[in-house]
Amino acid sequence: MTLQTWIDLVYLLAAIGFILALKGLSSPKQARNGNLLGAAAAAVAVAFTFLNPEVRAHTLNLVLTLVAMLVGAVIAVPAARRVKMTAMPQMVAIFNGVGGGAAALVSIVVFLIAAPGKPAVYRIAEVLFGVLVGCVSFSGSAIAFAKLQELMTGRPITYPAQQVINAVFAVAIVALAIGTLVTGSVPLLVATAVLSLVLGVIFVLPIGGADVPVLISLLNSFTGLAVAASGFTLNNNLLIIAGTLVGASGMLLTRMMSKAMGRSLANVLFSAFGSVVTATGGADGLGETRPVKAGTPEDIGVLLAYARKVVIIPGYGLAVAQAQHTARELADLLMERGVEVFYAIHPVAGRMPGHMNVLLAEANVPYDELKEMDEANPEMATADVALVIGANDTVNPAAKNTPGSPIYGMPIINADEAEHIVFLKRSMRPGFAGIDNELLFDEKTTLLFGDAKDTLSKLVAAVKDA
């Protein structure tokens, strides 16, 4: 076989590897292996790309590419190893944005090379699609990163005539794109790229922090589509397949997350959800205008120690406190005493899909102790204690009982059905949705204020003494 045939065969195997990797990522048990398989397939495909005679013919470009890869590795590897679990969503956002920006640049460079000969209209269309979607993904992901990293407010940013301004930019981009198709003009393409960058910014600004995880998933889909477009531009089948897989899986995940929140994608993107804070409690957990019942670790420790079934419901607060290891220590201690324990996982708990699964896997929590919302809810009514650690909106009964609530219709974990509810919180501040959690004021609820890790450590000590 010729070298090109070998390269094509490796590309085919890599594509199969990507598909199997996605299959592995669908299960917590196989997620690590799926991730490693996908990375290995990509590495082999890149290595064989360098064997292409057309690539090796451009020595300077080859050297520059290797240098760029080295610089990227030097930046990315330490960043990925040091990132905290609470910061993982914004890292995903910025890495995703870089991918979209790279795809847009590839399309622009190919167009610059071909522009003197006036490319065919379909070639210009491929370039335009990659530039438009890639630029929106790049700038939009940058704003999403800034929101999650708290470099700017996480609340929706709105201004007068916002929708009109967005529409004007969209119409201008369409007009420039049509002009580029007709004339093959480089300046018009550059103008399209610039306006697309602006569109990405104004598209993301009105989206609140609670909805940013859905947005990241959508932008990830955009990046995949931009990569697929650059694959058409470069006549590279593997890029087309890989980009299409990312685009399709990202869109499916976006729809699944929207469904888990009980809202349409249009509502997530255009409702400026979370712009109003209605919490009545003080930041320190004191001074609330509605009465709540606070407890001590010693009292709760006795309650847990003599329970029959305890359901642990983790949320973002668990990640913030890095309390997953202590939570597992408490669960193991209770199981040693004969208590049935499992973790109830909401699809959008935390700041990204699977956030809680990854967090608990880091603490070596057995997979069979994790139950998704639909599996956990039928057992909530028979639970003696629902131990809520840092979750908020995902257990708020207002989603079921208050038609006027912004989260009404959102599927939640039915913690309110347990015989006793123990809520670990830093304060009475609301969650990302910006509304009071009615569960805090339930007569069955006992609040433990403080850092989750510290509070869980005290609970461990109290259970041992019980």
Image (cartoon, grey):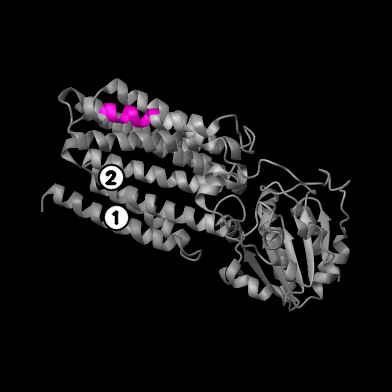
Mark 1–mark 2 Cα distance, whole angstroms, equals 15 Å
- Check the image and report above or below for 55 versus 180: below
Residue at 76% in and 70% down: 385
Range drawn in magenta? 172-180
Residue 238, numbered circle: none
- Quadrant placement of the C terminus: bottom right
Marks 1/2 in contact by CB < 8 Å: the verdict is: no
Q: Which amino acid does label 1 sit on?
A: Ala
Q: How crowded is mark 1: few (under 14 residues within 10 Å), some or many (20 or more)?
A: many
Name the disc covering residue 15, or none: 1
Q: How crowded is mark 2: few (under 14 residues within 10 Å), some or many (20 or more)?
A: few
Q: Where is residue 128 in the image (x, y as percent from the top left)?
A: 30, 34
The residue beneath circle 2 is 47
Three-letter amino acid code at disc 2? Ala
- Circle 2 — which element? helix
Measuring from the top left, give residue 5's x and y in whole percent: 14, 51
* Picture quadrant of residue 145: top right
Give x and y (percent) for residue 208.
Answer: 61, 42
Residue 69 visible in this rendered orientation of the protein? no
Q: Does the magenta stretch include residue 179?
A: yes
Q: Does the magenta stretch include residue 235?
A: no
Residue 408 image offset from top left, x and y in percent: 65, 57
Judge from the rendering whether residue 383 lies leftward or rightward of residue 216; answer left or right. right
